[in-house]
Amino acid sequence: MSAPEMDWPNIGFQYRETPVRFVSDYIDGKWDEGRFSTDSNVVINESAGVLQYAQTCFEGLKAYRTEKGEIVCFRPDLNASRMAESAKRLCMPVFPEDRFVEAVKAVVAANEEFVPPYGSGATLYVRPVMFATSPVLGVKPAVNYQFRIFVSPVGPYFKGGARPVSLMVSDFDRAAPRGTGHVKAGLNYAMSLFAIEHAHALGFNENMYLDAATRTHVEETGGANFIFVTKDGALVTPKSSTILPSITRRSLLYVAEHILGMKVEEREIPFEDVKEFVEAGLCGTAAVISPVGKITYDGGVIEIPSGMEKMGPVLQKLYDTLTGIQMGRIEGPEGWVVRIK
Ligand SMILES: *Cc1c(COP(=O)(O)O)cnc(C)c1O
């Protein structure tokens, strides 16, 4: 379907092929110049490192139109540096961060007609991905890699406003106790599929993972970090080296502290303390903030006081401020909103 015919508010969150992607290959120890491609398929050897030992990592960010009609994206430099960290941990070559940002802009511009209109709630999701293309059989890093950026228009995460979600404390671990939880990689998601299917079958929207080593502290969900609001209005978020460092979370903490004048704390959060919070939310690129209404665990149910009806007032204020900055309605810190066109 061509872009002008799309029913933007109802397109959902799924892959939709767009005309142009950026592709660069790492061969003979270096990244080539890169090129645009109209081919959405990848042909690789049956023993490629990505297929045998899951040598792959990815990123996710959005491009959208602001109130003034400009096409922008949000803090792509942080996606570039996070992907560099993921690549290093998986023994993959780093795609240069400045080239990453330039390629994001170029692919979005090349698929301009698929950037949804301002106010539709839809955005253009940008997916950079890197994977090992050359064959391996013994366990070792591959020699050749491909870096690719494709884009797909996605609908608004919530239609008709955010409804709070219901979580269960998972018996599973999201990632290994140490060393891999901060890596944005398919391998962590593959290991979480069984747990999320289990939670869905029991009627929950998502899992709350506790730290794998002691199972006493709050970590994150499968694909979003936690933020909590205390009785006295402070914003609290788990401190842990095994969760994925969310760019949305970093931005919300900054907005809370420097724009809204809130007290902000990043600290270990014992699960026992969760019942003391008055608001709870999940944060990530896709939804920005999803409110949490209930958390079910072995010993009972925690009902977050802000309830199952809508987002609590403090999180709503944070949400409005951050999305206001992203959409160009509120002036944000220098460099956050990057103009593409
Ligand atoms: C991507 C991701 C997040 C959210 O990060 P953002 O940069 O805010 O989109 C949180 N947790 C996990 C496991 C993720 O993969």
Image (cartoon, rainbow, N blue to C red):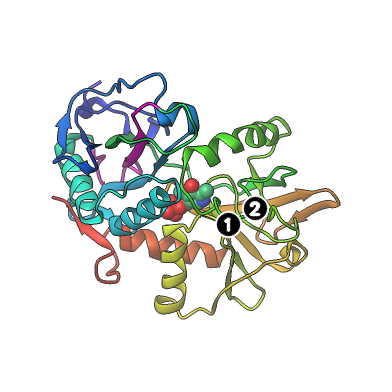
Please tell me which residue is depicted at 38% across the width and 37% down the height of the picture: 155
At label 2, counting other C-alpha atoms closer than 10 Å, the crowd grade (few under 14, some 14-19, many 20 or more) is some
| Residue at far front of view | 138
- Amino acid type assigned to the residue bearing label 1 in the image: Thr
Does 33 sit left or right of 54 as displayed? left
Q: Is residue 334 left or right of residue 273?
A: left
Query: How would you rate the neighbour count of disc 1 (Cα within 10 Å): few for under 14, some for 14-19, many for 20 or more?
Result: many
Position of residue 76 in the picture relative to residue 106 (left or right): right
Q: Position of residue 267 (x, y in %)?
A: 61, 72
**The one of 87 and 82 positioned closer to us in this rendering:** 87
Query: Judging from the image, what secondary structure is the residue with disc 2 in?
Result: loop
Query: Are the residues at dot 2 and dot 1 in contact (C-beta closer than 8 Å)?
Result: yes
**Kind of element beneath mark 1:** loop
- The residue depicted at 67 percent of the width and 59 percent of the height is 218
The vertical placement of 41 against 185, above or below, is above
Q: Is residue 123 visible in this depiction of the protein?
A: no
For mark 2, what is the residue? 177
Percent coordinates x, y for residue 217 in the rendering: 70, 61
Q: Is 122 a magenta residue? A: yes
**Residue 141 visible in the shown view:** yes
Left-right relation of 338 to 225: left
Quick one: quadrant of the N terminus?
Answer: top left
Q: Which residue is mark 1?
A: 242
**As rendered, which of 138 and 330 lies closer to the eye?**
138
- Bounds of the magenta segment: 115-135
- Which kind of residue does numbered mark 2 sit on? Pro
Residue 20, percent from left and from top: 19, 31
- Asked where in the image residue 275 lies, by quadrant, the reply is bottom right
Q: Position of residue 43 (x, y in %)?
A: 30, 20
**Magenta segment includes 307:** no
